[in-house]
Amino acid sequence: MTNIPVNSPETFGDAEQSGTAATIDLVAQAPEPQPGKQRPAVKRVLQGNRANLILFTFLPGQVLPDHEAAHPIFVQAITGRVTFTVGNEVTTLTPGTIMHVDQHVRHRVDCPEDADPAGSVFLLTMLTGEDR
């Protein structure tokens, strides 16, 4: 059996913000794209009570290979588009589309080769259920 990575909030580094109230411009806070890398740029922008916000910037062709989340998640495209695969179901996420996935469900994220060359910003909300 293949070991599939299981990601928790700490996988994505320290949070840039925490507290009882926070306002975040997701586009402005998106990590700088990483040309020449197989994986997208990533930044944990908020550690809040019971949830963490993690931003990714995908360039065309970049991928997060099969993995699982340790907690339930919501995922959505903020700009551009990515494809999100759970089992045999492939969903194209564009701004305005949100998807929920339970914990420990194998999934992957791909940025199509014909996506915006400036990058696609993707938001992961991890519902940890844990107080800060």
Image (cartoon, grey):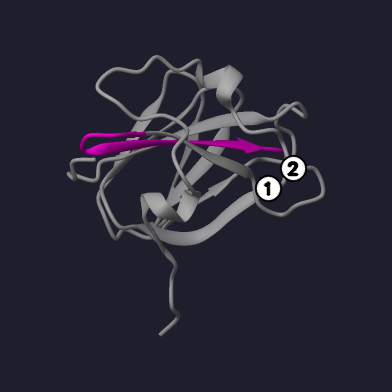
Where 18 falls versus 109 (above or below)? above
Residue plotted at (51% across, 21% down): 26
Q: Which residue is mark 1?
A: 62
Tell me the quarter of the image containing the C terminus.
Answer: top left
Instruction: Say which of 66 and 88 sits in front.
Output: 66
Task: Please report contact status of discs 1 and 2: CB closer than 8 Å, yes or no.
Answer: yes
Residue plotted at (72% across, 46% down): 61
| SS assignment at label 2 | loop
Picture quarter containing residue 31? Answer: top right
Q: How many marks?
A: 2
Where 18 falls versus 3 (above or below)? above
Residue 48 falls within the magenta-colored stretch: yes
Magenta segment boundaries in residue numbering: 47-59
Apparent side of residue 35 relative to residue 21 in the rendered image (left or right): right
Where 110 falls versus 121 (above or below)? below
Residue 94 falls within the magenta-colored stretch: no
| SS assignment at label 1 | loop
Tell me the quarter of the image containing the N terminus.
Answer: bottom left
Q: Tell me the chief SS of the magenta region.
A: strand
Where 16 falls versus 14 (above or below)? above
